[in-house]
Amino acid sequence: MRFGVLGPLRVDGGQAPGPAKHRTLLAALLLSAPERVPVERLMSMVWDDRPPASAESVLRVYVSALRKLVDGIRTVPGGYLIEVAPDDVDCHRFEQLVAAARQARAAGQIAEAADGFRAALGLWRGQALADVESSVLRRASAVPLEESRLTALEERVELDLRLGRGAEVVGELRALVGAHPLRERAWVRLIEALHQAGRRSEALGAYQDARRTLVEELGLEPGAELTAAQQRVLSENGSQPPHGEHAWSAHDGRQPGSGDGRPAGAVGDELPPDISDFAGRRQALDWIHRTVGEQAPAAPVHLVLHGPPGCGKSALAVHAATGIDLPDGRLHAALGARPPSAVLEDLLRSLGCPDGAVPPALDDRVRLYRTMTARRRLLLVLDDAADEAQVRPLLPTGPGSLTLVTSRSSLPGLEAARAYELGVLDEEEAVAMLGGVAGHERVRAEPEAARRIVRLCGHLPLALRIAGSRLARKPGWTLEHLAGRLGDERRRLDELSAGDLAVRGSLALGYRGLPDPERRLLRELSAWSAPDFASWVLGAELEPLAEAGLLQSRGLDEAGQERYGWHDLTRLYAAERLAEEDGGPGGVLAVRAEVILERTRQARAALLPAEPGTGRTEVHLPEHDTSEEGLPGDPALETGWLRQEARWLSAERRFLVASVDDFYRARLYEAAWRLAFYLTPLFELGAHHDDWHATTAIGLDAARAAGHRRGEALLLRGLADLHRAEGRTDAAAAALRAAQPLAEGVELARITLRLGLVQAQTRPGPTHPSPQAVQAEQAFVRALRAFEEAGDRRGRADALRALGALRQDEALLRESLAAYRDLGDPRGAAEALLDLARLHLAAGRHPQARDCVERRLGLNRRLGDRLPEAVALLVLAEVARAEGALEDAARAAREALETFTRYGDRRNAAQALLVLARTALEGDETDGAVDALMRAMGEFDGLGDEEGKAEAVRLAQEARRRRGQRI
């Protein structure tokens, strides 16, 4: 299968997608093939920078549809890619042919090179991406592709002229200048072709046409190359111009040489000295050299290296520039806050302009600078650029020139520039850099301490250089000693200072350059310890801080929000400023606590409608019509909203977990325990047991510090739910008994209900119920009565379901299902449906069981609840097994096992393995059964689940009996 984007989208050997967004998606993957395209970039291109909140899930649907038409589309971490050979995509084949033609030209094979360019240009069928509607993708790819086509055409024409084919290319060149009248190089080639064909008067007329167009359209006189072409026609009296000589001297920007081998008018080397102990950055250096090699020699190259303060942008630019030799010299300019006019004055003097000849006006300086660089191949480093407006006048215009710009911003508005984001070093590079400054022998002697210093410096090159310099000046210090000094957050920025190098000073430059509102925003963000955050936290746009290099975009999260993070040393600096200017984090946290609590409470209410502690919120008003599953109006719309709320909670989980601790440390105890309580359904839904333990412990401490008995009871109840989910029934019962004296009224009834659930986990015997089951039933009855007396509809629904499941009473379960529907709680309804499915399965009513479990699965999938979906798949597997559909049973159990494993739910994963083993045994696949049972035994053993392990052993004995060998 071959693909074409150099014209309308084409799939040879297959069918091109029809819908516009599908075409955009395929084109985006092909243009980057076989590299990964991040999800956020795809969403930007498919939806023209305006993706809806549901964009990521819709994108998955588009990918699925494309896979039916096109092979090789793969899902990879963070994005998608298409596995296709570069030669099978016409734009990549075009680049390969152009590169081969240039190699042939460099080897002196002029005719072969011209044919190579001609073959490359023959791949074009029209305008690139002609039927792709995405303006974002067209700007990013179609425009550069068209520029590459025009450049290749001009290079091919130049070769044709060297081969004496001027008369053959005149018509083609007239069409080219007609389509691109402001393209001076095309006019130059037309004048040369006419001159070579002996049509001198037409050549001079072409010059006049070009000059008139440039003056009328741009207000500019022709450039040096166009003027030189006219002068050659005037001076040579009809003889053919020496195409080989003048074409290549113009292309290379060279003038007649001087005695030192460097062209006349060339500047020297003004680069700062390279760093002798430079380490790492192999990928960035490869990118620079590869990009320079890929660019057309007829155009200047502009590269932007951007990243946070202290990440080594300047050092990398100088190191890279030192290894690139262009014939007309290297220039360097430190920008900072300097205006372009002042920088241009320095550059013009470096280029040989006498002091008195530098024009006073900016426009005149820009015009002179462009004239002086037009025929030079220069390398220019512009260090610490503030914005595009500062850089734009400083870009040299000479073909083949290279400009390396460093900035904290990516300078997205800089035309024809390519950007590379520079992050921190990886651990190996960081250790190598520390060794290069402090001494490799010292680093090898204390490898663990070296890695600790690297971590405390956040892998930031500036911090590592300072740490290494301090060690170099203190030969008596051990690395462990410095690591200990850096370990104190309060002193870390003080320690990271050596001579005129200081992390604090580097950060202060960026901070002082911000407007007052953005400075305050940066300070306030430091009140939180979370690794990343979204704009809603402070109710302000964070992109300006990212543009300043003080925050870094982390892309879109699963809720469709852009998330931002920052380097730990930036956070420490912002915290210093917050303490000094605003008195510390307490005030900021207190102001934003209510916003965070209310937003989280609303999301919790979507997970648990009408649950006490959430304001008894109901998902829909009672007068709304409800669907069969208890959803108002269109169930897909309603579950879509509920799913989005769950996604928001999941996206914000790390931030909210950290906020519990932040509130506690700020002595905002009420906010700490309430937030911990609001998060419990999220932790249960996603099996985030570590977060559940951590926040509950802090929340309990906070409730006790605040003297809030009800808060303590609520968190103890949540702790019991956690212990019960982990199979620790004794610990769950102990937490509930501790909560009983703290609770009253309906909350006491909830604790009673939970105690019944703990007791009910001991199943009834074959003929008589166990004492625990009797106690559980009594607890459920008491709780149900209390809920009904208090009018607690949520509690009543929960108690009915618990009692129905224990008694295996279909009427009670259906009553609970109706109660959940009345509440508008699809998750509660889903649990009741699963209990009904289990009841029907136990009674041998397989069609009814299948109906209930499939309805449950439909709800889980609309809500996006993957773990509950996996639990339902296990029941579906048991139904299929009972029906004799063993392949369906195994498939459902394997799908459930995959989900449990991905989420780290070991207990349910072990149960899934048991279902797989039973299914395999019934199908006489003893090897598969043994494999599943061995894994299940290991899981049950690790969990300390003796009952589960005993069942696995029993099944293993059965497998041994069937296979006739020991397990």
Image (spheres, rainbow, N blue to C red):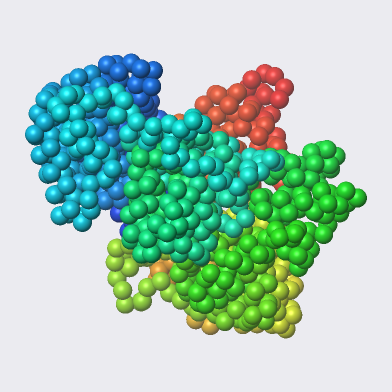
Residue 491 picture location, percent across and down: 77, 66
Image vertical order of residue 148 relative to residue 961, above or below: below
The residue depicted at 57 percent of the width and 82 percent of the height is 591
> In this orientation, which residue lies closer to the viewer: 669 or 494?
494
Which residue is at 51% across, 59% downward? 335
Q: Nearer the viewer, residue 890 or 202?
A: 202
The percent position of residue 601, horizontal first and vertical second, equals 52, 73
| Residue 606 visible in this rendered orientation of the protein | yes
Residue 878 percent across, percent down from the top left: 50, 41
Quadrant assignment for the N terminus: top left
In the picture, measured across the screen, residue 229 lies left or right of residue 500, that is: left
Mark count: 0
Q: Quadrant of residue 36?
A: top left
Rendered view: 208 above or below 483: above
Residue 710 visible (yes or no): no
Quarter of the picture containing the C terminus is top right
Task: Locate residue 212 relative to residue 833 in the image: left or right.
Answer: left
Q: Is residue 144 above or below residue 395?
A: above
- Image coordinates for residue 955, horizontal then vertical, percent: 65, 33
Q: Image point 25% across, 19% down: which residue?
A: 115
| Residue 185 picture quarter | top left
- Of residues 387 and 841, the one drawn nearer to the viewer in this rendering: 387
Q: Is residue 666 left or right of residue 311?
A: right
Viewer-proximal residue among 546 and 190: 190
- Residue at horizontal 66 percent and vertical 67 percent from the top: 573
